[in-house]
Amino acid sequence: GDSVTQMEGPVTLSEEACLTINCTYTATGYPSLFWYVQYPGEGLQLLLKATKADDKGSNKGFEATYRKETTSFHLEKGSVQVSDSAVYFCALRGSGDKLTFGTGTRLAVRP
Amino acid sequence: GAGVSQSPSNKVTEKGKDVELRCDPISGHTALYWYRQSLGQGLEFLIYFQGNSAPDKSGLPSDRFSAERTGGSVSTLTIQRTQQEDSAVYLCASSLGQWDEKLFFGSGTQLSVL
């Protein structure tokens, strides 16, 4: 079945550092890929998505590229801010209608 | 309302009791999802509704779990004879339609079974 594997956290960075959160997936066919973010005290919200190979999703300075050859969708940001502190979830939608999520990676950014 | 609303926000119950969790999706959203988030775990899919029907209920962990949706709107997740392992945050999400890939999540119900 479909599955998503993402790096364990927590990830602790200083402000303005570079961020990479790794995500790999297993799915049949051609899934759509997502990053969701959960800020403290808030519900999950869509951060970015990519629906086909080589697509790049981007939002709020975050980027992720759909790499079919490596079945990956790593989340990157060149310069993180304290306000980026949150839990980040990688997810995919395969042949069914549901989203399959990874375990989440907590990011803490220090001033 | 403006977003997905879940109630109660917190529920503490004794082992063996039944609980009902409620989800009010965004008005006009036909697809509704229930997920469970346990400590240290990812989001575990439970059930998906399109309108009032549930095409995919493959994630319900046991027959103690059931869900219904009425009027294409409000959904209720019922857990009978709760067990300690049922303790988790239960999340509801809705989307415009079956093929809409942007889910809007509620803030969840924190269930604690003592």
Image (cartoon, coloured by chain):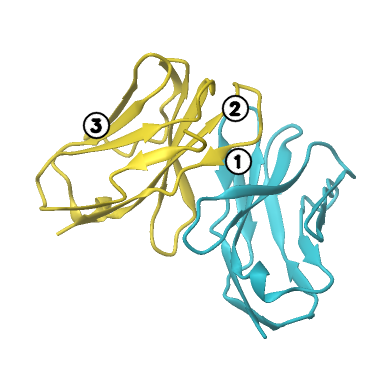
Chain colours: A cyan, B yellow
Looking at the rendering, which quadrant does residue B19 occupy?
top left
User: What is the total number of numbered labels drawn onto the structure image?
Assistant: 3
- Observer-nearest of B78 and B95: B95
Cα separation, mark 1 vs mark 3, equals: 24 Å
- Observer-nearest of A82 and B83: A82
* Placement of A70 over or under B35, stated as above or below: below
- Observer-nearest of A78 and A64: A78
Q: Mark 2 points at which residue?
A: A96
Which residue is at a point 63% across and 67% down the rendered structure image?
A7
Cα separation, mark 2 vs mark 3, equals: 22 Å
Say what amino acid the circle numbered 3 marks.
Asp
Q: Nearer the viewer, mark 2 or mark 1?
A: 2
Q: Is mark 3 on a helix, strand or loop?
A: loop
In percent of width and height, residue A73 lies at 76, 53
Q: Mark 1 points at which residue?
A: A2
Q: Name the residue under label 3.
A: B63
* Placement of A82 over or under A40, stated as above or below: below
Q: Mark 1 and 3 residues: CB-CB less than 8 Å, in contact?
A: no
Say what amino acid the circle numbered 2 marks.
Gly
* Placement of A90 over or under B68, stated as above or below: below
Cα separation, mark 2 vs mark 1, equals: 10 Å
Q: Mark 2 and 1 residues: CB-CB less than 8 Å, in contact?
A: yes
The 10 Å Cα crowd at callout 3, few under 14, some 14 to 19, many 20 or more, is few
Q: In this view, does B86 lie to the left or right of A20?
A: left
In percent of width and height, residue B108 lies at 39, 48
